[in-house]
Image (cartoon, rainbow, N blue to C red):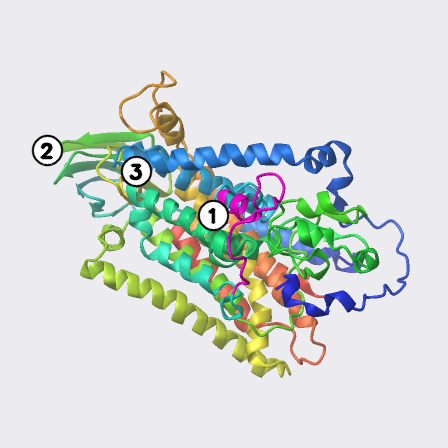
């Protein structure tokens, strides 16, 4: 790295820090009560994607349609189990924004470890920040690759 | 290709004469010869530690096959599934390859019995060597068969990775094939040309920070005995090695060299990348693209929320599976190679490069290696890390028969989702930086081109990384 180009890297680093930390305005939707009926069968949830707004009071009614299934949400430390044909409920406040995977907690067959769904709370800012960082990385790579 | 039989000229090869370069002051050494570290040299010069490790691995491998075939049919309760596809895979992708390139090959148990039979002895070559010792057919050289093997496993991945019996039969088949090939062909033909793991480990070892390298080419060329070549179970001649892809890091050449003229170097990442290539072979290009395509497909199948896709991949023989398999093959053999070739062709046109398109494609494929290696690492973090808690469970009860060998249960799952996501984003950001750097460096190797920035390939990296991010973090 030539000394007279050091400020390019400072600018890039500054942009990266801005991409990571710049606050994104939250959605204007007021928190509300929301209930979702999620059917679990081998090896999928229906619906597989649950979208809520930050602050919503969310109830998930888990219905197992074939064998016993569970549902645990990463990042929320919540889980429940439903017997076949029966409904289990979990209620929580969606106080953490982002995208969280939920997955089955009861061995239901060979693909059980990969039975997953998604809880989307508000905007997925991580994804957009990551995309922007990838763009910056591309630019930095091209810059660094010059001889 | 660096095997001696492919280089008949090596006996009378002219040696590159080092042109004196202006000495730069205060430059840090770019590589460190680990074989000069006394305790490490003592450990590596003695073949016994490595041999014992390989024997332990062999016993573990055979035990894994027995458990796979006789134990619980439920994958998450079977030692074989968890130890092979979670523990070993994680160690390979996050440890062996990024830190040691092809270092797993140095302790892999699969070729061991075949090698013993082939050389007629366990520690040293015996007088009565078994087998035909044929040369591997020239038409089958390269990584084409390894790519085919990886695609084959990929088409059946949902069942191979989850059904213990299928895993057991796959391991047994690989084992039998390795032994059989040792009895027919010379050296490690199975590892060099068939083993899918050897294929991508070798390819990604070009980016890794470890290499075995000749210290002084002059000394090597004047040494008529070629003891390093005769000792190498891979049939690799160190002086002819252009990169690290064919070296299994078995250390036999270091032990055999009477001149102490071989180094085990710790080097900067990507030392073998961004070099002009003379070859027009496209086998490694295809393997690199297959690795990229497979990482995308496996992420969608195993990490995505689409149940229909999981069932399509799992129900082997069904109509849905046929569509899945055809799509998997089409993506890896037509779509990605087609897009990549078009990107390179577009760049050839706008840069007015004088290189033939085929050679340019082979050369630019080097930029795919960082992206592929780190994409696989990112996939592995999501795929395997949350399931590492199963390891304790299957050690406690390998067959899934209700044993409690450790007297404990496996405990709850680990919620590493948020850390995983940040790590994955970091890896993909680094991968794009690295690939873009390699591509930009490659552009500067041809002074005749008019526009040095390869925009089409950079767009390819950007779109691929975006799609991968969407699958992992979307």
The answer to whether B142 appears left or right of A30 in the picture is right
Q: Mark 3: few, some, or many residues within 10 Å (few <14, many ≥20)?
A: many
**In the picture, residue A40 is in which quadrant?**
top left
Q: Is residue A120 visible?
A: no
- Judge depth for marks 1 and 3 and give the one in front: 3
Give the percent coordinates (x, y) of residue B44. Answer: 68, 37
**Element carrying mark 3:** helix
Rounded to the nearest angstrom, the CA distance separating label 1 from label 2 is 37 Å
Give the percent coordinates (x, y) of residue B279. Answer: 61, 72
Magenta-highlighted residues: B113-136
The answer to whether B233 appears left or right of B148 in the picture is right
Mark number displayed over residue B69: 3
Question: Mark 1 sits on what residue?
Answer: B378
Residue at mark 2 shares a chain with residue at mark 3: no
Residue at mark 1 shares a chain with residue at mark 3: yes
Output the chain of dot 2: A
Output the chain of dot 3: B
**Element carrying mark 2:** loop
Whichever of labels 1 and 3 marks the residue nearer the N terminus, that label is 3
Q: Does B12 appear in magenta?
A: no
Quadrant assignment for the N terminus of chain B: bottom right
Residue under the image location 90 percent in, 57 percent down: B23
Q: Is residue B384 visible?
A: yes
Residue under the image location 27 percent in, 22 percent down: B402
- Tell whether label 2 touches label 1 (CB within 8 Å): no
Residue under the image location 80 percent in, 48 percent down: B29
Question: Mark 2 sits on what residue?
Answer: A86
Rounded to the nearest angstrom, the CA distance separating label 1 from label 3 is 31 Å
Q: Mark 1: few, some, or many residues within 10 Å (few <14, many ≥20)?
A: many
């Amino acid at each position: 790295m030539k000394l007279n180009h050091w400020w390019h890297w400072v600018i890039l680093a500054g942009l990266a820090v801005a991409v990571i930390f710049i606050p994104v305005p939250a959605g204007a939707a007021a928190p509300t009560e929301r209930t979702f009926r999620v059917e679990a069968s081998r090896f999928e949830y229906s619906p597989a994607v649950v979208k809520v707004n930050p602050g919503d009071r969310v109830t998930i009614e888990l219905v197992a349609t074939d064998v016993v299934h569970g549902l645990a949400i990463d990042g929320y430390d919540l889980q429940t189990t439903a017997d076949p044909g029966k409904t289990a409920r979990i209620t929580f406040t969606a106080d953490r924004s982002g995208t969280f995977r939920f997955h089955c907690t009861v061995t239901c067959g060979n693909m059980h470890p990969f039975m997953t769904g998604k809880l989307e709370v508000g905007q997925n800012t991580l994804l957009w920040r990551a995309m922007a960082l990838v763009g910056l990385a591309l630019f930095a790579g091209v810059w660094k690759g010059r001889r | 290709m660096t095997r001696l039989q492919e280089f008949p000229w090596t006996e009378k090869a002219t040696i590159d004469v080092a042109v004196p370069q202006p000495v730069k002051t205060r430059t840090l050494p770019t590589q460190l010869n680990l074989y000069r570290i006394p305790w490490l040299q003592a450990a590596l010069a003695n073949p016994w530690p490595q041999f014992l490790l390989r024997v332990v691995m062999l016993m573990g491998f055979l035990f894994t096959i027995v458990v796979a075939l006789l134990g619980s049919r439920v994958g998450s309760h079977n030692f074989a599934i968890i130890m092979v596809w979670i523990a070993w895979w994680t160690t390979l992708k996050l440890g062996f390859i990024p830190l040691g390139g092809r270092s797993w090959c140095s302790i892999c148990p699969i070729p061991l019995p075949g090698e013993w039979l082939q050389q007629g002895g366990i520690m040293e070559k015996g007088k009565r060597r078994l087998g035909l010792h044929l040369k591997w057919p020239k038409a089958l050289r390269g990584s084409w068969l390894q790519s085919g093997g990886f695609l084959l496993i990929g088409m059946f991945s949902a069942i191979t990775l989850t059904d213990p019996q299928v895993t057991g039969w796959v391991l047994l088949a690989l084992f039998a094939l390795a032994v059989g090939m040792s009895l027919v062909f010379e050296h490690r033909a199975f590892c060099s040309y068939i083993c899918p793991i050897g294929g991508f480990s070798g390819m990604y070892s070009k980016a890794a920070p470890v290499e075995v390298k000749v210290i002084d080419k002059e000394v090597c060329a004047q040494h008529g005995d070629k003891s390093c070549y005769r000792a190498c179970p891979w049939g690799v001649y160190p002086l002819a090695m252009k990169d690290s892809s064919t070296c299994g890091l078995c250390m036999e050449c270091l032990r055999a060299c009477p001149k102490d003229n071989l180094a085990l170097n710790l080097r900067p990442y990507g030392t073998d990348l961004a070099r002009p290539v003379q070859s027009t072979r496209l086998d490694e290009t295809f393997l690199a693209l297959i690795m990229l395509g497979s990482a995308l497909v496996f992420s969608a199948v195993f990490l995505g929320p689409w149940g229909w896709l999981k069932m399509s991949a799992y129900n082997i023989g069904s109509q849905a599976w046929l569509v899945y398999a055809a799509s998997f093959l089409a993506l890896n053999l037509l779509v990605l190679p087609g897009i990549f070739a078009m990107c390179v062709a577009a760049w050839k046109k706008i840069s007015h490069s004088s290189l033939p398109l085929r050679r340019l494609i082979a050369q630019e494929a080097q930029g795919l290696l960082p992206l592929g290696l780190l994409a696989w690492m990112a996939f592995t973090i999501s795929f395997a890390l949350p399931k590492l808690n199963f390891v304790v469970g299957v050690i406690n009860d390998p067959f899934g028969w209700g044993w409690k060998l450790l007297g404990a249960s496996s405990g709850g799952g680990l919620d590493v989702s948020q850390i995983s996501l940040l790590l994955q984003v970091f890896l993909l950001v680094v991968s794009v930086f690295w690939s873009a750097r390699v591509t930009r460096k490659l552009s500067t190797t041809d002074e005749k081109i008019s526009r040095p920035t390869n925009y089409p390939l950079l767009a390819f990296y950007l779109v691929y990384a975006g799609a991968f991010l969407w699958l992992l973090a979307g």
